[in-house]
Image: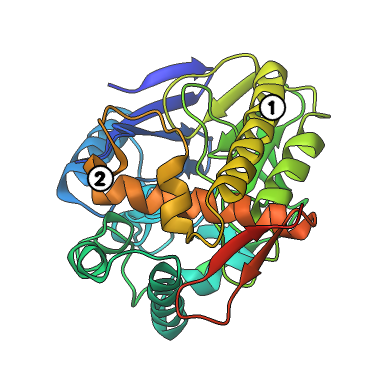
């Protein structure tokens, strides 16, 4: 059942099968002429059932409804082409459109495979996981290409609400939040989450994903946000949370550096196994493959930031990249 958050703004909890995230917050703005959906869920029967049930309860006609996507991850974008009909427009950050379809998406996935191997993942884990990985198997239709670009500062008006796009790179290369100034309300996607920390991985063609994320947090903290509407779980004190997230990554950087110092010439896979993670497992060996995937990605972003700030050196001359401290 959709939950009304303010007049004509609703949250639909979309079930995410086999995901520790459990649900996605899909938001719906009902307008007099056109409606807006913010994010959609994986491309699965379960997600589609819970989203379409909520849309039916709200009396949403997709011919008069647009979709805006905060970022490229498939738990936010997977269903968008499937629920669209003639008349539906789908918007996403201009820089992330190449990740969404066709040969560019296939190429970027191939590059991911190489990155994983060079990170030190055992080959048997790669072969077992990649074919069935949720970010790929539940992604949007690779043939759909009718995405419309969003640029920083673009505005969207639906009913009595105007949303302004705010570019917040980090979690993805050009993640977008959407600011409603009059209501002091922001749709934060996965840029600011309250019950969990957004995963920050190392992206292709991005020099320093973690550096981008930290800068985006400091930038967005200047907005007078009284209500944050996150992509997952519940809301909280926005400014307190941005400070907590910055502090969290400062601690993680220190922990990552200490692991490099203590275990010189280790791979990202091995270094991630020396770091602490909030997961109910006895050891690194017991981690589910999907969680290792996210952990190594986050470790890589911290290693790159440490490299960019002159604290460590990456040796890329070997098949598996190794890291060593510079102090």
Residue located at (64% from left, 21% from top): 241
Report the front residue among 187 and 122: 122
Q: Is 130 rendered above or below residue 78? A: below
Question: Where does label 2 land, which residue?
Answer: 285
Q: Do the residues labelled 1 and 2 touch (CB within 8 Å)?
A: no
**Residue 155 in view here:** no
- Judging from the image, what secondary structure is the residue with disc 2 in? helix
Task: Residue 52: give x, y in percent of width and height.
Answer: 25, 40
Q: Is 5 rendered above or below residue 61? A: above
Residue 116: name its quadrant. bottom left
Q: In this view, does 126 lie to the left or right of 60?
A: left
* Dot 2 crowding, Cα within 10 Å, few <14, some 14–19, many 20+: few
Residue located at (50% from left, 43% from top): 199
Q: Quadrant of the N terminus?
A: top left
Question: Where does label 1 land, which residue?
Answer: 247
Q: Is 77 rendered above or below residue 101? A: above
- Between label 1 and label 2, give the one nearer the viewer: 2
Q: In this view, does 220 lie to the left or right of 116?
A: right
Report the front residue among 191 and 154: 191
Residue located at (40% from left, 65% from top): 120
Task: Tell me the distance, in whole angstroms, between the alpha carbons under discs 1 and 2.
Answer: 28 Å
- Judging from the image, what secondary structure is the residue with disc 1 in? helix
Q: In this view, does 209 lie to the left or right of 126?
A: right
| N-term-proximal mark, 1 vs 2 | 1
Report the front residue among 117 and 209: 117
């Amino acid at each position: 059942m959709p939950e009304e958050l303010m007049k004509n703004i609703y949250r639909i909890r979309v079930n995410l099968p086999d995901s520790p995230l459990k649900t996605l917050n899909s938001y719906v703005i009902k307008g007099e002429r056109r409606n807006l959906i913010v994010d959609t869920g994986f491309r699965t029967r379960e997600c589609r059932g819970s989203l379409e049930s909520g849309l039916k309860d709200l009396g949403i006609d997709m011919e008069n409804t647009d979709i805006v996507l905060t970022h490229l991850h498939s738990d936010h974008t997977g269903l968008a082409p499937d629920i669209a009909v003639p008349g539906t427009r789908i918007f996403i950050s201009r820089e992330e459109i190449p990740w969404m379809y066709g040969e560019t998406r296939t190429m970027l996935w191939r590059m991911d495979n190489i990155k994983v191997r060079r990170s030190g993942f055992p080959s048997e884990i790669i072969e077992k996981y990649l074919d069935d990985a949720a970010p790929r198997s539940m992604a949007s239709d690779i043939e759909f290409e009718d995405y419309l670009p969003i640029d920083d500062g673009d505005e969207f008006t639906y009913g009595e609400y105007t949303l302004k796009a705010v570019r917040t790179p980090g979690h993805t290369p050009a993640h977008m939040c959407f600011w409603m100034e009059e209501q002091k309300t922001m749709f934060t996607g996965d840029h600011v989450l309250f019950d969990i920390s957004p995963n920050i991985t190392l992206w292709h063609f991005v020099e320093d994903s973690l550096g981008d994320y930290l800068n985006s947090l400091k930038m967005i903290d200047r907005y007078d946000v009284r209500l944050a509407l996150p992509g997952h779980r519940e809301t909280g004190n926005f400014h307190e949370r941005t400070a907590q997230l910055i502090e969290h990554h400062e601690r993680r950087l220190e922990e990552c550096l200490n692991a490099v110092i203590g275990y010189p010439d280790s791979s990202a896979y091995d270094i991630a196994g020396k770091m602490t993670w909030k997961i109910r497992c006895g050891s690194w060996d017991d981690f589910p493959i999907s969680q290792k995937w996210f952990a190594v990605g986050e470790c890589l972003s911290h290693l790159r930031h440490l490299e960019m700030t002159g604290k460590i050196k990456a040796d890329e001359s070997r098949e598996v990249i190794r890291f060593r401290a510079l102090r």
